[in-house]
Image: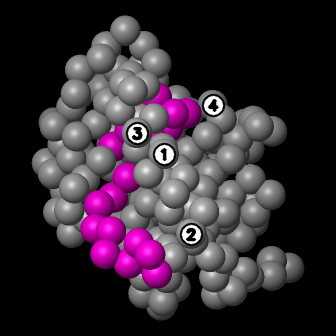
Amino acid sequence: MLNLDNFELGGLNKDILQLETSEENNLCATALVEQTRQTLEIASRKLDPLVYDQVNFIAAIKNLVLGSRKATVRIIVWEPDLIIRRGHRLLDVVSKLSSFMEIRRAGIEHKDYNSSLLIADGIGYINRKKSERFEARASFNDRRQATLYLNEFEEMWDASLPDPNFRRIVI
Protein backbone atom coordinates (compact mmCIF):
# COMPACT_ATOMS: atom_id res chain seq x y z
CA MET A 1 0.00 0.00 0.00
CA LEU A 2 1.24 3.46 -0.91
CA ASN A 3 2.34 5.44 2.15
CA LEU A 4 2.38 9.20 1.60
CA ASP A 5 2.80 10.25 5.24
CA ASN A 6 6.28 11.69 4.61
CA PHE A 7 5.29 13.61 1.49
CA GLU A 8 4.35 17.27 1.59
CA LEU A 9 3.87 19.46 -1.47
CA GLY A 10 7.03 21.56 -1.64
CA GLY A 11 8.40 19.79 1.44
CA LEU A 12 11.84 18.33 2.09
CA ASN A 13 11.16 14.91 0.60
CA LYS A 14 12.23 15.03 -3.05
CA ASP A 15 11.86 11.31 -3.71
CA ILE A 16 10.34 10.19 -7.00
CA LEU A 17 7.47 7.80 -6.41
CA GLN A 18 6.80 4.91 -8.75
CA LEU A 19 3.06 4.29 -9.02
CA GLU A 20 1.72 1.08 -10.51
CA THR A 21 -2.03 0.82 -9.94
CA SER A 22 -5.12 2.96 -10.35
CA GLU A 23 -5.49 2.98 -6.56
CA GLU A 24 -1.96 4.36 -6.09
CA ASN A 25 -2.62 6.99 -8.78
CA ASN A 26 -5.85 7.99 -7.05
CA LEU A 27 -4.24 8.19 -3.60
CA CYS A 28 -1.32 10.23 -4.87
CA ALA A 29 -3.50 12.54 -6.98
CA THR A 30 -5.84 13.10 -4.04
CA ALA A 31 -2.93 13.83 -1.68
CA LEU A 32 -1.45 16.32 -4.15
CA VAL A 33 -4.79 18.09 -4.64
CA GLU A 34 -5.42 18.20 -0.88
CA GLN A 35 -2.13 20.08 -0.50
CA THR A 36 -2.53 22.34 -3.54
CA ARG A 37 -3.13 25.99 -2.71
CA GLN A 38 -3.48 27.77 -6.06
CA THR A 39 -3.13 25.95 -9.36
CA LEU A 40 -3.95 22.50 -10.60
CA GLU A 41 -3.55 21.31 -14.17
CA ILE A 42 -4.74 17.97 -15.50
CA ALA A 43 -4.27 16.54 -18.99
CA SER A 44 -6.08 13.24 -19.46
CA ARG A 45 -7.49 11.54 -22.54
CA LYS A 46 -10.72 10.47 -20.82
CA LEU A 47 -10.44 11.71 -17.22
CA ASP A 48 -9.56 8.22 -15.99
CA PRO A 49 -12.58 7.27 -13.85
CA LEU A 50 -10.51 5.02 -11.57
CA VAL A 51 -8.34 8.01 -10.67
CA TYR A 52 -10.42 11.17 -11.11
CA ASP A 53 -14.03 10.00 -10.65
CA GLN A 54 -13.57 8.82 -7.08
CA VAL A 55 -15.26 10.37 -4.03
CA ASN A 56 -11.97 11.25 -2.30
CA PHE A 57 -10.57 13.03 -5.36
CA ILE A 58 -13.80 14.94 -6.03
CA ALA A 59 -13.88 16.08 -2.37
CA ALA A 60 -10.27 17.28 -2.63
CA ILE A 61 -11.06 19.30 -5.78
CA LYS A 62 -14.11 20.91 -4.13
CA ASN A 63 -12.09 21.79 -1.03
CA LEU A 64 -9.32 23.32 -3.15
CA VAL A 65 -11.68 25.52 -5.13
CA LEU A 66 -13.93 26.49 -2.23
CA GLY A 67 -10.99 27.05 0.12
CA SER A 68 -9.15 29.70 -1.88
CA ARG A 69 -10.29 32.57 -4.05
CA LYS A 70 -7.01 32.27 -5.95
CA ALA A 71 -7.49 28.61 -6.84
CA THR A 72 -7.71 27.67 -10.53
CA VAL A 73 -8.17 24.25 -12.04
CA ARG A 74 -7.58 23.69 -15.75
CA ILE A 75 -8.33 20.38 -17.41
CA ILE A 76 -7.62 19.21 -20.96
CA VAL A 77 -9.31 16.09 -22.32
CA TRP A 78 -9.15 14.28 -25.67
CA GLU A 79 -12.36 12.26 -25.56
CA PRO A 80 -15.09 14.63 -24.33
CA ASP A 81 -17.93 12.65 -25.92
CA LEU A 82 -16.93 9.51 -24.03
CA ILE A 83 -16.61 11.43 -20.76
CA ILE A 84 -20.03 13.02 -21.14
CA ARG A 85 -21.71 9.80 -22.31
CA ARG A 86 -20.20 7.79 -19.46
CA GLY A 87 -20.85 10.51 -16.88
CA HIS A 88 -18.23 11.88 -14.50
CA ARG A 89 -18.61 13.54 -11.10
CA LEU A 90 -15.95 16.08 -12.00
CA LEU A 91 -18.21 17.51 -14.71
CA ASP A 92 -20.78 18.44 -12.05
CA VAL A 93 -18.10 20.21 -10.01
CA VAL A 94 -16.83 22.10 -13.05
CA SER A 95 -20.35 23.23 -13.99
CA LYS A 96 -21.07 24.49 -10.46
CA LEU A 97 -17.68 26.16 -9.92
CA SER A 98 -16.92 27.40 -13.43
CA SER A 99 -15.40 30.64 -12.14
CA PHE A 100 -12.48 28.61 -10.79
CA MET A 101 -12.43 25.59 -13.09
CA GLU A 102 -12.32 25.09 -16.83
CA ILE A 103 -12.30 21.98 -18.95
CA ARG A 104 -11.31 22.05 -22.61
CA ARG A 105 -10.96 19.69 -25.55
CA ALA A 106 -7.41 19.20 -26.78
CA GLY A 107 -6.50 20.86 -30.04
CA ILE A 108 -5.87 18.88 -33.21
CA GLU A 109 -2.15 19.66 -32.92
CA HIS A 110 -1.99 17.38 -29.88
CA LYS A 111 -4.30 14.60 -31.04
CA ASP A 112 -1.54 11.99 -30.62
CA TYR A 113 -0.61 12.99 -27.07
CA ASN A 114 -1.04 9.84 -25.02
CA SER A 115 0.30 10.72 -21.58
CA SER A 116 -1.64 11.64 -18.48
CA LEU A 117 -0.47 14.55 -16.41
CA LEU A 118 -1.36 16.25 -13.14
CA ILE A 119 0.59 19.30 -11.92
CA ALA A 120 0.02 20.78 -8.46
CA ASP A 121 1.10 24.37 -7.72
CA GLY A 122 3.90 24.07 -10.29
CA ILE A 123 5.96 21.90 -7.95
CA GLY A 124 4.32 18.48 -7.63
CA TYR A 125 3.23 16.14 -10.40
CA ILE A 126 2.08 12.74 -11.57
CA ASN A 127 3.07 11.69 -15.07
CA ARG A 128 1.93 8.55 -16.83
CA LYS A 129 3.72 8.07 -20.13
CA LYS A 130 0.89 5.89 -21.46
CA SER A 131 -2.58 7.05 -20.51
CA GLU A 132 -4.09 3.57 -20.80
CA ARG A 133 -1.68 2.20 -18.16
CA PHE A 134 -1.23 3.17 -14.53
CA GLU A 135 2.55 3.05 -14.26
CA ALA A 136 3.56 6.59 -13.30
CA ARG A 137 6.22 8.78 -11.78
CA ALA A 138 5.21 11.27 -9.13
CA SER A 139 6.87 13.87 -6.96
CA PHE A 140 5.71 16.26 -4.29
CA ASN A 141 8.75 18.49 -4.71
CA ASP A 142 10.44 18.68 -8.10
CA ARG A 143 10.01 22.23 -9.36
CA ARG A 144 12.34 21.70 -12.33
CA GLN A 145 10.44 18.72 -13.74
CA ALA A 146 7.05 20.18 -12.82
CA THR A 147 7.98 23.35 -14.73
CA LEU A 148 8.84 21.30 -17.81
CA TYR A 149 5.47 19.55 -17.56
CA LEU A 150 3.73 22.88 -16.97
CA ASN A 151 5.32 24.32 -20.13
CA GLU A 152 4.05 21.28 -22.05
CA PHE A 153 0.59 21.77 -20.54
CA GLU A 154 0.56 25.49 -21.38
CA GLU A 155 1.34 24.72 -25.02
CA MET A 156 -1.57 22.26 -25.13
CA TRP A 157 -3.86 24.67 -23.25
CA ASP A 158 -3.17 27.45 -25.74
CA ALA A 159 -4.17 25.12 -28.58
CA SER A 160 -7.19 23.64 -26.79
CA LEU A 161 -10.79 24.69 -27.33
CA PRO A 162 -13.81 25.09 -25.09
CA ASP A 163 -16.26 22.29 -25.77
CA PRO A 164 -19.92 23.40 -25.71
CA ASN A 165 -20.89 19.97 -24.36
CA PHE A 166 -19.22 20.86 -21.06
CA ARG A 167 -21.38 23.94 -20.59
CA ARG A 168 -24.39 23.04 -18.56
CA ILE A 169 -26.81 25.41 -16.93
CA VAL A 170 -27.24 24.70 -13.23
CA ILE A 171 -30.66 25.68 -11.89
Residue under label 3, please give it: 148
Q: Are marks 4 and 1 in contact (CB under 8 Å)?
A: no
Q: Are marks 4 and 3 in contact (CB under 8 Å)?
A: no
**What is the CA distance from the residue labelled 3 to the residue labelled 2?**
17 Å
What amino acid is at disc 1?
A: Asn
User: Relative to 171, is 8 on the left or the right?
Assistant: left
Residue under label 1, please give it: 151
User: Relative to 120, is 171 on the left or the right?
Assistant: right
What amino acid is at disc 2?
A: Ala
Residue under label 4, please give it: 37
The mark closer to the camera, 4 or 3, is 3
Frontmost residue, 149 versus 66: 149
Q: Are marks 3 and 1 in contact (CB under 8 Å)?
A: yes
Numbered disc total: 4
Residue in the image at 51% along x and 76% along y: 107
The magenta segment: 108-126
- Where residue 88 appears, as percent x and y from the top left, is 50, 74
